Amino acid sequence: MSVHQISRNSEEESKFIRDRLIEFNAGQVPADLNRYEEINLNIKDQEGKIIAGLLGECCWNWVEVHILWVDPAYRKHGFGSQLLTEIERIAREKECTFIKLNTFSFQAPGFYKKHGYQEMAVIDDAPRGFKHYYFKKDL
């Protein structure tokens, strides 16, 4: 077998590859666990401007938080905690057994530890001069 061409994917080609892996994975996991659902939350101010948000997904028996962001002007007012509490509530409602997420040393590892998340791994010098943390919380 020879490689004819290596190139960057178009959006359509990326979707094709992603769908093939999802199809394969679905055949390996019990049918009742085959689920995928994006869970995206936000908090808005009185004018309807988003001041905090969380982007995540429910996959198999867990929820993964990809992004938790709070506008700098609204930090230290509990909005991040509210979002984390809500995603944990949703995860329990969906009968997930854990939540996983990652963060950097310049972001919020202490915040997640305060909320009961356990450090699973740390990669040093990622990005250079910082640490990349992986956390999990059993539900």
Image (spheres, helix red, strand yellow):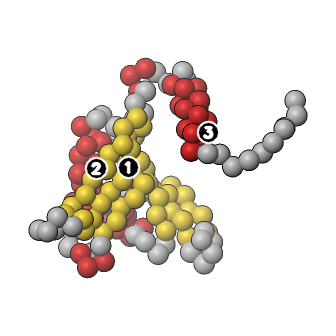
Q: Residues within 10 Å of mark 2 (few under 14, many from 20)?
A: many
In the image, 116 versus 15, the foreground residue is 15
In the image, 71 versus 96, the foreground residue is 71
Q: State yes or no: discs 1 and 2 in contact (Cβ < 8 Å).
A: yes
Residue 11 in the image: state x and y as whole percent.
56, 44
Q: In front: mark 1 or mark 2? A: 1
Q: State yes or no: discs 3 and 1 in contact (Cβ < 8 Å).
A: no
The type of residue carrying mark 3 is Glu
Q: How far apart are marks 1 and 2 (CA)?
A: 9 Å
Q: Name the residue under label 2.
A: 87
> Which is more N-terminal, label 3 or label 2?
3
Residue 96 tag number:
none
Q: In front: mark 2 or mark 3? A: 3
Q: Mark 3 points at which residue?
A: 13
Residue 8 makes an appearance in the image: yes
Q: Name the residue under label 1.
A: 56
> Which is more N-terminal, label 2 or label 1?
1
Q: In front: mark 3 or mark 1? A: 3
Residue at left offset 42%, top offset 68%: 109
Residue 97 in the image: state x and y as whole percent.
36, 39
Secondary element at image label 1: strand
> Which is more N-terminal, label 1 or label 3?
3
Q: How crowded is mark 3: few (under 14 residues within 10 Å), some or many (20 or more)?
A: few
Q: In which quarter of the image is the N terminus?
A: top right
Residue 29 in the image: state x and y as whole percent.
50, 24
